[in-house]
Amino acid sequence: MKKIVYVISGPTATGKTALATQLAKRIDGEVVSADSMQVYRGMDIGTAKPSTMEMRAVPHHMIDIVEPDHDYSVAEYQTGAKMAIEDILQRGKNPILTGGSGLYINAITYALDFSTPADDALRNTLEQKDAGELYCMLEARDAIAAGRIHPNNKKRVIRALERALSEDQNASYDFEQYNEAYDFHITTLCCTRDKLYERINARVDAMMADGLEREVQGLADQYGSAPTSMQAIGYKEFFAYFAGHASLDEAVESIKRNTRRFAKRQLTWFKRDQRARWIDIEEITQPDEIVERILKNEE
């Protein structure tokens, strides 16, 4: 019999962390983060990392594992998360994969291969081109991959182009073949668009009250704006403010707007997986009630 891996997905600000913690307490579980920015140390407020209390109550994995100037890849995540899941299972615990980074979740729940054969000549050729030209090339070859990468992230654009141009790889990630190693029990949280936007706006306000500006300023002083991590929503918007090109209110509004747009893309992404059970957090409002629904569906 396949071992169960619980998955809690959904757009930002839908309460995934609280639910994962509640579920872990109920089933003797441990949480494996599937958030592409929570891997970075020091990026705490803007990535909505679990609270100190949540981390003490339940072990969390794949959080605070690299410095912000490390160009962390989905391939690295896939390796680390699979090791964490196996470790949890071998100790007789129950893994709960949770987060809003769709590709990170799919790296575990689908049979995806992120290895690309080395082609030094191709990479040297690509590295001679500027970021704008490379991004246009990627859009022409693989519009889906281009939509997931910031146009200025030259390293990731080059990696995606290497995959797209390789004769041995399909141009896009294959989301047809599931990972059959585990029995994935997937729950996706949702709510109406108006309610989601309200929750996003409130969370950004709470982040500001908790010291987000100070957090970003400290990271900017140490790492500048170049690392991939500093292009994350909640961080990149401050650089115009720091440079005197925007007000603080404008920076905050940009964070809210960009987060709302991101949430729309997340919903589109998660709708692809037919295995997911969708739960409306406006109909079932408490994490413990959702846990009951998840466990009832297992019976």
Image (cartoon, rainbow, N blue to C red):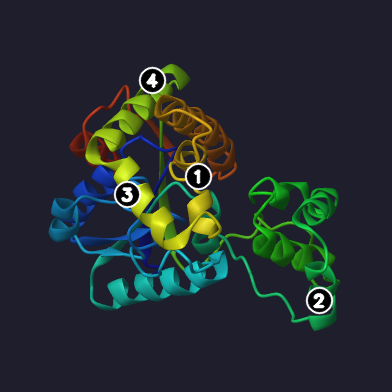
Looking at the image, which residue is at 45% across and 31% down?
251
Identify which residue, 181 or 131, lies in the foreground.
131
Residue farthest toward the front in the current orientation of the protein: 244
Q: Which residue is mark 2?
A: 124
C-alpha distance separating marks 4 and 1? 25 Å
Residue neighbourhood size for the residue with mark 3, other residues' Cα within 10 Å, grouped as few (<14), some (14–19), many (≥20): some
Going from the N terminus, do you reach mark 2 or mark 3 first? 2
Judged by depth in the image, the label closer to the viewer, 4 or 3, is 3
C-alpha distance separating marks 2 and 4? 48 Å
Marks 4 and 3 in Cβ contact (< 8 Å): no
Q: Which residue is mark 4?
A: 195
Q: Quadrant of the N terminus?
A: bottom left
Residue type, mark 3 in image? Glu
Looking at the image, which residue is at 48% across and 34% down?
259
Going from the N terminus, do you reach mark 2 or mark 4 first? 2
- In the picture, residue 115 is in which quadrant? bottom right
Please, what secondary structure does the residue beneath circle 4 have? helix
Marks 1 and 2 in Cβ contact (< 8 Å): no
| Horizontal arrangement in the rendering, residue 5 relative to residue 141 (left or right) | left
Height in image: 219 above or below 208?
Answer: below
Q: Is residue 295 visible?
A: no
Residue neighbourhood size for the residue with mark 4, other residues' Cα within 10 Å, grouped as few (<14), some (14–19), many (≥20): some
Q: Is residue 251 visible?
A: yes
Judged by depth in the image, the label closer to the viewer, 2 or 4, is 2
Residue 157: horizontal and vertical position, in percent?
71, 59
Residue type, mark 1 in image? Lys
Residue 182: horizontal and vertical position, in percent?
44, 65
Marks 4 and 1 in Cβ contact (< 8 Å): no
C-alpha distance separating marks 2 and 3? 37 Å
Residue type, mark 4 in image? Lys
C-alpha distance separating marks 1 and 3? 12 Å
